[in-house]
Image (spheres, helix red, strand yellow):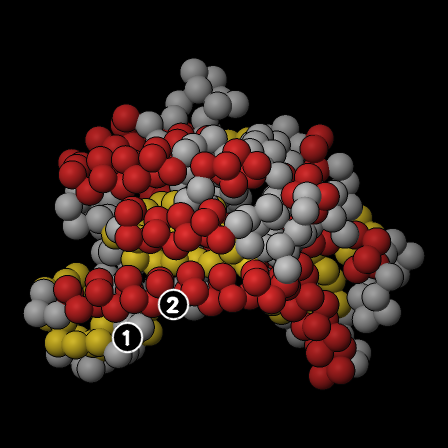
Amino acid sequence: MAVEVVTFGCRLNAYESEVIRRAADGRDAVVVNTCAVTAEAVRQARQTIRRIRREQPSARIVVTGCAAQTQANTFAAMPEVDHVLGNEEKLSREVWAGLTAERKTAVGDIMAAKQSAPRLIEGLDGRARAFVQVQNGCDHRCTFCIIPFGRGNSRSVPMDEVVAQVRRLVENGYREVVLTGVDITSYGSDLPDAPKLGALVKQILKAVPELRRLRLSSIDSVEADADLLGALAGEPRLMPHLHLSLQSGDDLVLKRMKRRHLRADAIKFCADVRRLRPDVVFGADIIAGFPTETVDMFLRSLDLVEDCGLTFLHVFPFSPRPGTPAARMPQVAPATIKDRARRLRERGETALRRHLDGEIGRHRRVLVESRTLGRTEQFTPVHLVAPHDPGTIVEVQISGHDGRQLRAA
């Protein structure tokens, strides 16, 4: 059988799963590409591994990804697991070729990784849009985050190699490309002349004029440079949707998180971008129940949804990650965390419904993902009454919504 990859977590993991399929080509294995961002993500990975073993007793199970990198011994101790690979090793044909029954674990020192080698792929199976990795790792040390220990320090893919990958994907028929990484707004700091993300975006759009839509994955607003904002203002092919790593709306919590922005910075950024690109839509990550968070601190996060004009909310109930400073801080009661996460999600649902209401009657260009589902330029999901071929861009009129997605006549 061909290698099967089960993917958890971020867009970068989805991209790397495609690289894994090629690196492990010809290997008879089920690969679980894990996420470590929350304890729940790790629990789901372990649960999936056990289920795979029950359903496929003779399968060769290989576990990799951020959870495997940070908790290699935990996964190696599972009787269901045959091999554990680190985040660098999982992408290497040589490592895959060298796997033997005697070598169960191949997890190197991720902090020793100095370069992010380009991983040229022809596309992503079953997807209408393609991801391109421009950066990996993170130099920041937010007190709640385990990911730098799973991904290593920040390292960028040279600009010409990113452009070549985008060009190849467009030649293969992709109309939308998403730039992805762990901290993409830190792009270029390790490259000669230190080009920033905005310069990369402008170069892609200039060098690949056939590209219809360029999209960014999650960004850190405090690192957004002038060229990036200029591209948002003047280049319609750069999509009007930004997902922001905000995490909290309270200044003291942000300080304890070791974030580099304040509440006022987030509000100003959203207002400034909205003036430059009035049709922009914002999403954001917010953590509920960070250690020491009081009721008033939480309410400031709740109010941030309105103050920033957020539409798509990604709520993380805080879970302590072993080895991080936040795990040693005074914890909020689990029941309180759960309630705050619920209230944040409800506020997010209200914001999304308001956005959907405002779309009724508008004409939107939709990238078709499946025959009856697509997304607008603002990344809003649309149910298509009339089926279309996946990968095409169609113009539709929005006739209604169901509270979660738009409906096109």
* Contact (Cβ within 8 Å) of mark 2 with mark 1: no
**In which quadrant will I find the N terminus?**
bottom right
Q: Amino acid at mark 2?
A: Glu
Task: Please name whichever residue, 119 or 293, is drawn nearer the observer in this view of the structure.
Answer: 293
Earlier-in-chain disc, 2 versus 1: 2
The residue that disc 1 covers is 403
Task: Please name whichever residue, 89 or 110, is drawn nearer the observer in this view of the structure.
Answer: 110
Which is in the foreground here, disc 2 or disc 1? 2
Numbered label attached to residue 346: 2
From this viewpoint, is residue 280 visible? yes
From this viewpoint, is residue 390 visible? no
Task: Please name whichever residue, 255 or 372, is drawn nearer the observer in this view of the structure.
Answer: 255
Q: Position of residue 170 (x, y in %)?
A: 31, 50
Mark 1 crowdedness (10 Å alpha carbons): few <14, some 14-19, many ≥20 = some
In this rendering, position of residue 185 left or right of residue 37: left
51 versus 341 height, above or below: below
Q: Quadrant of residue 385?
A: bottom left
Label 1 SS:
loop
103 versus 385 height, above or below: above
Q: CA distance from mark 2 to mark 1?
A: 12 Å
Q: Quadrant of residue 384?
A: bottom left
Q: Amino acid at mark 1?
A: Gly
Label 2 SS:
helix
**In which quadrant will I find the C terminus?**
bottom left
Q: Position of residue 279 (x, y in %)?
A: 17, 50
In this rendering, position of residue 381 left or right of residue 275: right
Q: Position of residue 128 (x, y in %)?
A: 35, 63
148 versus 331 height, above or below: above
In this rendering, position of residue 81 left or right of residue 278: right
Residue shown at the point (59%, 46%) measured from the top left: 292
